[in-house]
Amino acid sequence: MEPQSDPYVIDQPTAEQLSAAAGNAFQPRTPISAREFFAGRWEQLTTVADSVAQAGLHIVIFGERGVGKTSLANVVSPLLTVMEESLTQKPAIPRLVVKVNTHHGDSFSAVWRRVFDEVSWFENKPMIGLVPQQTTNHVSLRTAFKISDTPTIDEVRRALGAIPRSVFIFDEFDRGSNPLRLAFTDLIKALSDYAVNSTIVIVGVAETIDGLVKDHASIIRSIVQIHLPRMTEKELTDIIEKASKVLGIEFSPEASKLVVKVSQGLPHYTHLIGLHSAREALKRFTKKIEVSDVHRAFPKAIQQAIQSIQEIYSRAIQSAHKDALYEKVILACAAASSDAMDTFGYFRPADIVKPLAVVLNRPNVKIGTFRDHINEFCEEARGSVLEREGKPRSYKYRFKEPLLPPFIFMNAAANNSVDMDRLKMLTACA
């Protein structure tokens, strides 16, 4: 009886093709725009679709940096298209969906001028002459509606009233000016008062809706608040499984679990680590990704991590003393952060004891061992990587930059600060 060949083994040309295709299936740099690659967030997606279907409602999507707000905003248009195609009676008017980014310090006029310039169509106009001819002119919405260079709230309201069922998405809204937020509050109130059948979608980094909309009490009945929390482990696993299905590869359960644990609820890292883990396996001419491939992927993932994250980390752990504990304490803080039950990621000094014992390979660790370190992490000299809240003796802490803890885990593995067994124990803490 002949031995069966390994079903995962592939030849070099196939491995090279899959390695190139992996860049489309895993997209760490670019927010997801294709519906087939978007995993999880079904509850939030249906809330968006239901809200858009009801005239007079507007949407605010908020959450931490890195949780996938832009990716969610990107799939609103294809989602609405698919849902309307399934209707027995198709809408008479096609839906217009426009998405623009808010720039630093943008005013109300600036963002709406960008919107109206973004929308255009081709208009047929007859030419004057002996032989009737047609030429096509490119017309922007601003030109067609004769909107001024500095659109006012009333101009915007009238324009939106002439485009029923339209949806306007404003990403990175928190980058705009304070007057912008107040003006949008007034606009939403005006759209509600005049029963304009258009939807405004505001997307931005914030812990609560207060961080994005001023005086929201006056428009509370017109606003649907969608908080985008960190993804669950199942949702992150769905990302891996969707990409694997597209590529025809397979992550072992242990490899998938490690990617998910290190990602700490942030899809950016699931895509980043998943991409390089797949490519490490493909170098071995196999379609089966193992834990060892994930570990080999960490150095590549670190190299491609956002430059500002690398700089923040370096500043936090810098020390002239060889035996300084900053690097080890911040790793324990990362483990405590990922295990935190607090909605906003706060952890307490007692939560650091167990992971630091793992990092130091010591049975007993006292809070006094690292109390000064975590206090220093809150100071400007170390980049204020931690935020502190509460009163003395009852302080709680969290990372100011949500993308930092997963980077800390990857860096520890890549630099052999902890071996594979202790990393496994740390992610179990997480």
Image (cartoon, rainbow, N blue to C red):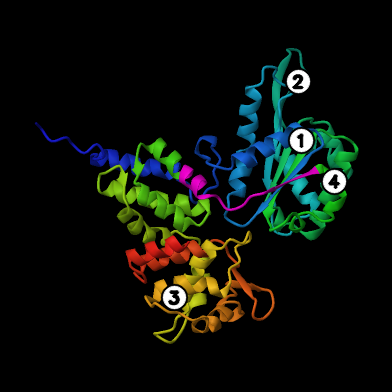
Observer-side mark, 3 or 1, equals 3
Residue 187 shows which numbered tag? 4
For the residue marked with disc 1, what is the amino acid? Leu
For the residue marked with disc 4, what is the amino acid? Leu
Answer above or below: position of 262 versus 221. below
Q: Residue furthest front?
A: 364
Judged from the image, the secondary structure of the residue bearing numbered disc 4 is helix
Question: Of 91 and 349, which appears nearest the observer?
Answer: 349
Q: Which residues are magenta?
A: 223-239
For the residue marked with disc 2, what is the amino acid? Met
Label 2 vs label 1: CA separation? Answer: 22 Å
Q: Residue furthest bottom?
A: 321
Tell whether position 238 is magenta: yes
Residue at the spot of label 1: 141
Count of labels shown?
Answer: 4
Observer-side mark, 4 or 1, equals 4
What residue do we see at 53% from left, 70% from top?
A: 351
